[in-house]
Amino acid sequence: MRKRLLIAGCFLLLGASPAVAEAPLTAGDHIGYTMNAKERVKTPLIWQIELIDERDQSTEVIELNEFGYQPGNTVQRDELVVFAKQLAEAIDTPMRNPTINKDGVITPGQARVILAEEELVDTLFNATFLDSQIPLPIYVTEPTVSEKQLEGIDLYEIGAFTTYFNPNVAGRSENIRLSAGSIQDFVLGPGDQFSFNQVVGERTIERGYKEAKEIVNKEFVMGVGGGICQTSSTLYNAVEEAGLEMVERITHSKDIGYVPAGRDATVSWGGPDFKFKNPHSHPVIIRTEVSLERGEITVSVHSSHRITP
């Protein structure tokens, strides 16, 4: 489904009032005016555009002068690109399917909302002084799983794996707990793809992550979020047993100990990611359990259907 944001244009003119022209100016033009057989359209001194979000009717007025426009000068496209990116950060929302916890409590899903940044830039750059409303493309994708499909989703355990850690290393243990919590009860519909970095998010002090040892260029160094690769590696072994399809996986540059050699999945923010997708014809749900007393993490994958080898 596509939703559209409307942009209403207004401006102050140098000279005569605007009139319909055969070849109207665009924001990217340098020319001072256009004309038809009878009259001219003067270049505006101040070119304002009101952004109207149809979802809640909120508005924001911008001036193309702030993006390099002035009579005789074009709008700077690179500045529009920066603006579109900032606007997208406020609009874009990742899709999340509804989910259900072990107690049967359902959390509603949310649609994926994406502002098409390049289309917005093209629309503004090619806007004319005569445009009163311009659609801004916003694309909405509904969740791929309904709440009804959650019935019995944890009936069968189709994959599971457990690894162990030293619970006396507080920072590392806390990082494992936090990252495991981020993937708890995550539901993938048929064909859905999972990205560890996208789901878990950036590992920062502000989000509760601690400094702990991590591997960088074959060496152990201290870093915020150290230890989360144990979560991603445990997840890898569980989802592989569940028959999920690997999309991206990179192993560590040295032996890590908590899984057999070659059975790990390294991740880092802005670097390697662990991705997989659900090739089955039905949804699956990921469950995690972390014991800070016993020093263990278990990741399991469940479904309403048994998986045939």
Image: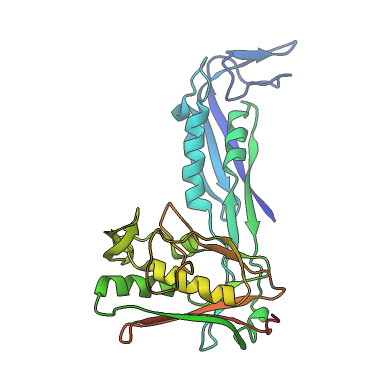
Q: Does residue 234 appear in the picture of this structure? A: yes
Q: Nearer the viewer, residue 225 or 65?
A: 225
- Residue farthest top in this picture: 37
In front: 111, or 63? 111
Q: Residue at x 51, y 36 (%)?
A: 81
141 to the left or right of 30: right
Quadrant holding the N terminus: bottom right
- 77 or 200: nearer the eye? 200
How many labels, in total?
A: 0
In percent of the image, x 25 and y 75: which residue is there? 169
Query: Which residue: 67% across, 79% down?
Result: 149
Evaluate whether residue 63 shows in this view. no
Q: Is residue 49 above or below residue 30?
A: below
User: Quadrant location of the C terminus?
Assistant: bottom right
Q: Position of residue 99 (x, y in %)?
A: 56, 77
44 sits to left or right of 259: right
Give how far across and how far down residue 67 sits, in percent: 47, 29
Relative to 108, 279 lies left or right = right
Which x, y percent locates residue 126?
63, 28
Q: How is the rendered protein coloured?
A: rainbow
Task: Determine which quarter of the picture holds residue 158.
Answer: bottom right
- Examine the rendered structure and indicate whether residue 6 appears above or below residue 236: above
Residue 155, x across and y down, in percent = 62, 88
